[in-house]
Image (cartoon, helix red, strand yellow):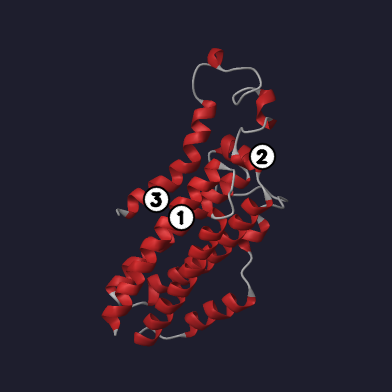
């Protein structure tokens, strides 16, 4: 799968519904629907207004694990000497950034619609705060990776961390999709993420075989 298509799919999963709600002549819009002032709080306008506890838990877990993958991949971009790993780290940074933006935009659809930017949650928002938290074990792992010299030891450490992290991410998507979720946009994002993560695990395991 072309990874640029994966990135485009993730972005389209959230931007397409928003565009559909705001485009078109004003005369064709029905009262109380998206595009009118009264419709912004109506049920079904965006996934952000009808998030269940399962939706929120899925988003928080995905962003937390994704943040670890993002930070370690940024380190690997600078330190790995393996061409395959450097290429993987570069794509991982791009894809985790896009996924985080999509999930942030689903948390704060009103801010996204107004500014066109999903990357900056509003100050004081309680929904986005958990996404930025990294647990102590992950912080320790990131610090250990930063302190490891470039070379085979670093490459193996980064690779193993990515395999374990991606398996954790895959479990989060699978558990969410098996919980019979009702939010269609959220389900689409989870399915796209699951496909991306599955592809990444296959790539990582292939690199592992080459390094043995």
Tell me residue 140's x, y (percent): 58, 80
Q: CA distance from mark 2 to mark 3?
A: 25 Å
194 over 26 or under it: above or below: below
- Residue 193's label in the rendered image is 1
Few, some or many residues within 10 Å of mark 2 (<14, 14–19, 20+)? some
Mark 1 and mark 2 lie on one chain; the one further toward the N terminus is 2
The x, y position of residue 17, in whole percent, is: 51, 34
Q: Is residue 140 above or below residue 128?
A: below
Residue matched to label 3: 7
Asked whether residue 89 appears in the rendered view, the answer is no
- Camera-near label (3 vs 1) is 1
Q: Residues within 10 Å of mark 3 (few under 14, many from 20)?
A: many
Query: Which numbered dot is residue 114?
Result: none
Residue in the foreground of this view, choosing between 114 and 176: 176
Residue placed at 58% from the left, 45% from the top? 106
Camera-nearest label, 2 or 3: 2
The mark that comes first in sequence, 3 or 1, is 3
User: Disc 1, disc 2: CB below 8 Å?
Assistant: no
Secondary element at tag 3: helix
In the image, residue 14 lies at what x, y percent? 50, 41
Q: Residue at 42% x, 61% y: name it.
A: 197
Labelled pair 3, 1 in contact (Cβ < 8 Å): no
What residue does disc 2 label?
49
Task: Locate the N terminus and report the quarter of the image it occupies.
Answer: bottom left
- Residue 148 locus on image (x, y percent): 45, 85
Q: Quadrant of the C terminus?
A: bottom left
Is residue 194 at least partly visible in the picture? yes
């Amino acid at each position: 799968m072309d990874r640029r298509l994966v990135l485009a799919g993730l972005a389209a999963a959230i931007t397409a519904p928003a565009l559909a709600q705001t485009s078109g002549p004003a005369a064709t819009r029905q009262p109380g629907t998206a595009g009118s002032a009264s419709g912004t709080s109506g049920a079904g306008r965006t996934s952000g207004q009808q998030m269940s506890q399962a939706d929120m838990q899925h988003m928080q877990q995905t962003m937390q694990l994704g943040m670890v993958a993002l930070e370690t991949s940024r380190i690997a971009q600078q330190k790995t000497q393996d061409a395959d790993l450097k290429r993987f780290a570069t794509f991982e940074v791009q894809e985790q950034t896009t996924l985080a933006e999509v999930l942030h935009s689903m948390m704060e659809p009103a801010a996204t619609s107004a500014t066109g930017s999903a990357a900056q949650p509003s100050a004081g928002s309680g929904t986005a705060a958990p996404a930025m938290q990294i647990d102590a074990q992950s912080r320790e792992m990131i610090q250990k990776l930063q302190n490891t010299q470039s070379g085979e030891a670093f490459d193996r450490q980064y690779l193993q961390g990515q395999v374990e992290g991606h398996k954790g991410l895959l479990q989060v998507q699978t558990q969410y999709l098996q919980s019979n979720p009702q939010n269609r946009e959220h389900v689409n994002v989870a399915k796209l993420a699951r496909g991306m993560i599955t592809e990444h695990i296959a790539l990582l395991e292939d690199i592992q075989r080459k390094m043995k």
